[in-house]
Image (cartoon, helix red, strand yellow):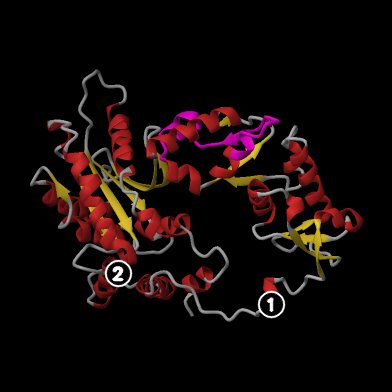
Amino acid sequence: MNLFRVLASGKRGLNEENMSACLAWLLHPGMDHGFGPAFLKAFLAEIGSHAEAADAQFQGELAQLGERIKYRLRSNSEDDLSIDVELEHNAGGQGFVDVLVSVNDDWVIAIENKISAAAAQDSTQLLGQYRGLCDEACAGQPEPASPEGRRLMVFLVPPHSLAQAEEDFERSVLAEWNELQLGEMHRQDGKVLVSWRRRNGRPSIENVITRMLGDELDGEIEPLHDQTRHTLLALRRFISGDFEGYPFSRKKSVGGANPATEKRIRLSGLAKEADGFVGVAAGLSGLLCHLKDAPLDSRDFQFTRQDMSHVQNWLPARSVLAIAAAAQAGFPDIGAVMACAPDGKLSLPGDLLLWLAEQPGKPGFHVGIQGGAASLAAMNHRDVQGRKWGISTQAHTKQWIDSATFARLYRQARDRLA
């Protein structure tokens, strides 16, 4: 049994955040996997010989870091290395780093993880993250200041997009970074392209896992717990299979209708069936997407009188009617939309939020963004477009921005892309 493949077989599969959390768990010496810093040490050894840096001593210093981690963690000394692993680190308001490994004040290893080919083509965001990390290191120092310590920017891509990522990486990240002319203070830093799967001599997470299993067999590390060993074996197989789930067979339905569907019905007919349920792909978010493209009274809906209140992607007919009425009135109250969400909470993609914010009724709502407006302004268009954002009728903290500000910053990101 491969639990990774089981979870990837679901409708949404394993996403980028899931795989980042898995990698962070492996890299953190204090987690319950039981092999301490062994994976982190193997990871540093794997990427060290491939890191590209202006300073020729960088690779050797990275190798020394691995040895220091092994020695210090076993010495029980008061000056043992302090190792911290963080998910979604806000790099000075200039982008979020998927996984950040910090070792004392000496090293920062920033990992930007991609698991889809489309996302892996956007490698320029490393530059913003790098600048943000440098700003953090210079905080509190007089201007001009040199960022202390070492920074290694790791761009982790899926195996099936490595060739494209290499081209983009060489053309955009490496070329643009070399043209920044940041001076001597940045020569201690490096960057490296890593693949999840072993391929073309590039460093890979698959290689790190293979090394871990081999080191245990050779007695180079302490014996692994059976569950940990099985997890590593399952993960290696999952990576080598390009993150594919199991090929479950799906029951075919006539005309694409859900088997629970009793009939198809127009919006005008729903008023007489207000106690029933309507099937919409992606639920309330999908209903709004349909509304964005065409009026709801122009389409047929899957309908049933069965109780579907706890079934995904089925909405009460009353909710569909309420959304249609709110749209006809120009969305005077976004609360009418949120009231139709099953749990009273709603997350929508960037394009849909922009459309709502630009409706003639000028609905007032707020968008929750970690880091607030400054963080949103630093994001590129794909990041804003592809992520789902929580909305509310009020600002709960300073990290909630109003819809007009969201729309303005989103349009700016889109214009930069154009």
Q: Nearer the viewer, residue 256 or 276?
A: 256
Q: Position of residue 346 (x, y in %)?
A: 66, 45
Would you call the spot at circle 1 few (<14 residues within 10 Å), some (14-19), or many (20 or more)?
few
Residue 222's disc is 2
- Identify residue type, mark 1: Ser
| In magenta stretch: residue 264 | no
Q: Position of residue 150 (x, y in %)?
A: 21, 40
Q: Nearer the viewer, residue 65 or 163?
A: 163
184 lies left or right of 227: left
37 lies left or right of 280: left
Q: Residue at x 64, y 38 (%)?
A: 356
Residue 253's disc is 1
Is 353 rendered above or below residue 166?
above
Q: Position of residue 413 (x, y in %)?
A: 43, 36
Q: Residue at x 26, y 38 (%)?
A: 105
Is 241 rendered above or below residue 84?
below
Q: Position of residue 128 (x, y in %)?
A: 32, 37
Is 295 rendered above or below residue 4?
above
Would you call the spot at circle 2 few (<14 residues within 10 Å), some (14-19), or many (20 or more)?
some
- Identify residue type, mark 2: Glu
Please give the count of numbered marks on the rendered protein. 2
Is 247 rendered above or below residue 281?
below
Q: Nearer the viewer, residue 382 or 225?
A: 382
Which region of the structure is painted magenta? 355-380
Q: Residue at x 65, y 51 (%)?
A: 285
Q: Quadrant of residue 393?
A: top right
Of badges 2 and 1, nearer the viewer stands 1
